[in-house]
Amino acid sequence: MPWSRPRRGSASGRTPAGDRAPAAGRVWLRWPGSRRRVRAALREAALTAVARGWPVLPGARPLSGPAGPCSCADPSCPVPGAHPHDPPLAAATTDARMVGWWWEKRSPDAPVLLATGRSVSAVSVPARAGARALAWFDLMGLPVGPVLAGQGRYLLLVAPYSLAELGELLAEQPSVPGVMRYHGPDGYLVLPPSRTGAGPVRWVRPPVGERPWLPEVGGLLGALIAASSADAASTSLGKQ
């Protein structure tokens, strides 16, 4: 929240030359340095994504108190601060001027949403399954691309895929856990350093370079399915 203090005049009680005396009851507001740093970091993250060719847009903001839980004004919002609202998802762009204006003037506190399906897609699994899968990839010497953690999940960024391609890949698997999620065409995800109603989003494996390498989803599915199935089985046993 901002703090405020009255603007000071001169020792004589008059305002300095060229300054207008504040109206009765008016105060001058300043944002704490931490708030400015957060806003600057969000804007920088959005512009960095655009430089990589990733289309972004500002998302709904998580709110606390009577106005909450989300700026979308839905009192029962299931994912506060983690979804598009105004502008809609279709407005996602790689236009640096538009993106800069969004986070400078229109929505400086908004989470950074990445629209998936155009230049990047993703697969997400529960956090424990994601950590298990990454350990296996490292053990086998298999490279992975950028990986996010947030809302209790790991999101592995991959090269764009169509829904038809994904459907064919999943059809080849003997079974697919229902806890897996797919962020392809018409999807989105939240980028760091955004904070949602469920907490902050962070990089587990940050992007490397101006145009980060993205693996094909087919090369990751087997391990992600196995890790998700093992995690589901261990969770089920723990409840017995």
Image (tube, helix red, strand yellow):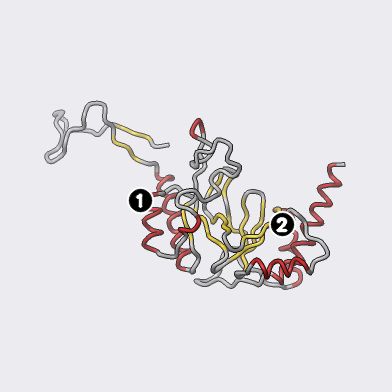
Q: Is residue 4 above or below residue 40?
A: above
Look at mark 2 in the image and give the residue it sits on.
180
Q: Earlier in the sequence, mark 1 or mark 2?
A: 1
Front one among 176 and 14: 176
Query: Where's residue 205, x and y in %?
Result: 61, 63
Front one among 201 and 9: 201
Look at mark 1 in the image and give the residue it sits on.
105
Toward which corner of the image does residue 182 lie, by quadrant? bottom right
Say whether residue 160 is left or right of residue 4: right
Say whether residue 183 is left or right of residue 172: left
Calculate the distance from the C-alpha at mark 1 to the C-alpha at mark 2: 37 Å
Mark 1 element type: helix
Question: In this view, which residue lies farthest toward the top?
Answer: 24
Residue found 52% across the figure and 53% down from its top: 193
Residue found 73% across the figure and 66% down from its top: 221
- Residue type of the residue flagged with mark 1: Lys
Circles 1 and 2: CB atoms closer than 8 Å: no
Quick one: quadrant of the N terminus?
top left
Q: Is residue 129 above or below residue 158?
A: above
Which disc, if any, is residue 220? none
Label 1 crowding class (10 Å Cα cut-off): few <14, some 14-19, many 20+? few
**Visible residue check, residue 45:** no
Query: Where's residue 153, x and y in %?
Result: 67, 53
Label 2 crowding class (10 Å Cα cut-off): few <14, some 14-19, many 20+? some
Question: In this view, which residue lies farthest toward the left?
Answer: 17
- Residue type of the residue flagged with mark 2: Met
Query: Where's residue 107, x and y in %?
Result: 41, 49
Mark 2 element type: loop
